[in-house]
Image (tube, grey):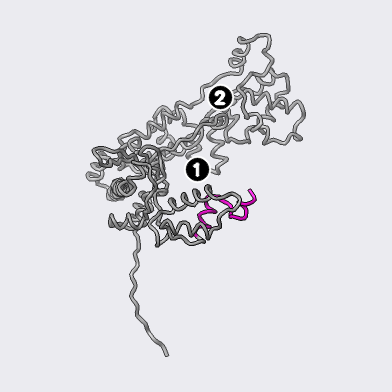
Amino acid sequence: MLQQNISQSQQQILSVDQRQSLQILAFTNQELDEFLSEEYMQNPLLECRRDRQSEIVDSLEGHYENASSYRDHYIQWEDEDADRRGDIRAREPSPLREQIKGQLNIRSYTQQEWDLIDYLIECLDDRGFFPYEPAEIAGAYGCPEEMVRKCLSDLRKLEPAGVFSEDISECLLRQLETAGEEDDVLRSVIRDYLPDLLRGNLSTVTRALGISTAKCRSCIRKIAALNPRPLMNTQKEGTEYIVPDILARRENDKWVVTLNDSWMGEYKFNDYYIHMMQTASDPELREYFRGKLERARLIVNSVERRRSTIIRIVETILDEQADYFLNGKELRPMTMDKVAEELEISTSTVSRAVRNKYLQYRQPVLLRDLFSGAASEKTDASADVVRKRIGEIVREEDRARPLSDDRIAKILKEEGMRISRRTVAKYRQQMGIPDSRLRACL
């Protein structure tokens, strides 16, 4: 017997635009800047008050390799000390030689070749380029030119990609090869038109290769992502700094919250192309511009919604955790559900808005670290407060007779924190505190 059942269910299906908007909300400032830069390169209807294209071109131009000869370079050594012109140039102590030679198999080389490799490494300029002819090196070092070519061929296959290249074009092409990039247009731009690109002559490149301005911009973006100085990150170790996404300050007993994004520039619609769309007689061209304009509107509106949403959420967090920020007290129990309910938005929106973002008031703090529920339904104390108290109890215990988790739970109960023994054990383990049996042996 066949039966037919009819049921009704409600599902929320997000459109492509909604998903894009949520993705933008979840971006950190750095991720958003990269996303907007890529959109700007591909969408003529999107305009940035900060000239991203010129910035990229200028930064590349600063790295462009100028021709130099081995003789010019060698004369500098000779002028410093004519009696030691055969010595290897002195460098500041660095692991560069070990890093490069560590990638080679010493058994594949004769002793003379191995010594020559040391010499070639010392001939690298500060960027990692080797702008000298093998014949010049062979004459100066006193070895066959073929030996120099063989060693250079092997060295140019090593990491970092592009090291030992003759100039920046070869360096960038080697990086594309290592990354498996097969864009022939991009390779042609780097190989044949990089000087034009660096001078800002985009029209020369687009006409010569028969490509659109958008494609040329895309090439610029990809080139900017490559490393024009292979040794840039190998000989220095610098301190990494946290750049906060949100800034907060206190004025007249109120929180003032701003996004730390002014360095990105302001994105607007390009009036020139809007006028072109409105006056174009070609329907395909009008449709193309219409699609790009809709995309630009989505991006700009989503960025503004992201800004207002994050500011509202952070203001709520700051009000809730005012004692923590102003007086250095413990964090209060605060969940994303609670913030979402107060602002009448979804919990997932709060989660996306605080994802990987740092807030700075007096010092940077990861927004997610400000959330914590109560340790249990039977206490108002946050998990952080309970963990801190457990640590204090352990530090104050009799070393000869350490307290069990059950005993710690009873002490907490007497102080108004009703925590189970299993929860005590979990928090103790999170803090790296051994159990009572092991503490007795310490």
Of 176 and 115, which appears nearest the observer? Answer: 115
Is the Cβ of the residue at disc 2 closer than 8 Å to that at disc 1?
no
State which region is magenta: 423-442
The amino acid at mark 2 is Asp
SS state under label 1: loop
Residue 1 appearing in the image: yes
Q: Earlier in the sequence, mark 2 or mark 1?
A: 2
Query: Image point 62% across, 22% down: which residue?
Result: 123
Residue 8 location (% of width, % of height):
33, 75
In the rendered image, residue 32 lying in the magenta stretch gets the answer no
Q: Nearer the viewer, residue 281 or 72?
A: 72
Q: How many numbered discs?
A: 2
Residue 171 left/right relative to 377: right
Q: Residues within 10 Å of mark 1 (few under 14, many from 20)?
A: few
- Residue identified by numbered label 1: 183
Q: Which mark is residue 78?
A: none
In this view, the residue in front, 272 or 111, is 111
Residue drawn at x 67%, y 13% as measured from the top left = 85
Residue 390, placed above or below residue 32:
below
Q: Amino acid at mark 1?
A: Asp
Q: Magenta: predominant secondary structure element?
A: helix
- Answer above or below: position of 238 versus 16: above
Q: Single out the mark in the foreground, 2 or 1.
A: 2
Residue at the spot 39% in from the left edge and 48% down from the top edge: 331
| Quarter occupied by residue 94 | top right
Q: Splitting the image into 4 quarters, where does residue 43 fall?
A: top left
Q: Is residue 284 visible?
A: no
176 relative to 294 in the view: left or right: right
Q: CA distance from mark 2 to mark 1?
A: 29 Å
* Residue at the disc numbered 2: 126
Measured from the top left, where is residue 415 in percent x and y?
Answer: 42, 56
